Image (spheres, helix red, strand yellow):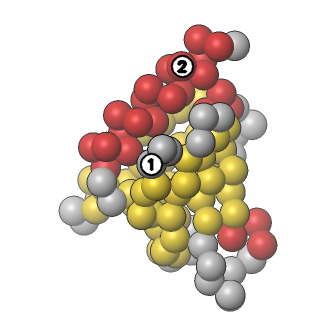
Amino acid sequence: MNPYFVASIIREGVLGGGISTDEEKMTYHTNKLTVSPELKRIEMRYADISEISFQRRFLFPVFSIRLKDNREYRFIVFGSKRFRSFLKERVKTAAMDV
């Protein structure tokens, strides 16, 4: 079973949602009605991730994920240790498959 992470994207404020995962990608999604369509569902293939950074901001675990096409997303992810190890492993495995 693929893990699910409670997460909020940081984009002109903080927008609650979640990150679902599968073997090839993770998908941030929110059900908020007042959000632009491009932020409602963001797919990020592990093979397309070029950089991951982590820092604490005001006690919140913030992940910055940069894709190879230079798009960058910042998320507050609850269960940050589990997310960090999961993401490192999936990105590493995707890089080996290329």
- Looking at the rendered structure, the kind of residue marked 1 is Pro
Q: What residue is pinned by disc 2?
A: 93
Question: According to the image, label 1 marks what residue?
Answer: 3
**Residue 15's spot in the image, x, y percent?**
52, 75
**Whole-number angstrom distance, CA of label 1 to CA of label 2:** 16 Å
How would you rate the neighbour count of disc 2 (Cα within 10 Å): few for under 14, some for 14-19, many for 20 or more? some
Give the SS element for disc 1: loop
Q: Which mark is residue 13?
A: none
Q: Is residue 57 above or below residue 81?
A: below
Residue 39 in percent (x, y) is at 69, 67
Rendered residue at 68%/57% (across/down): 42
**Can residue 10 be seen at all in this image of the molecule?**
no
On screen, residue 85 versus residue 31, left or right, reads left
Considering the image in quadrants, where does the C terminus appear? top right
- Work out whether 63 lies above or below 12: above
Going 48% across and 44% down the picture, which residue do you hit?
1
Task: Choose between 72 and 40: the one closer to the eye.
Answer: 40
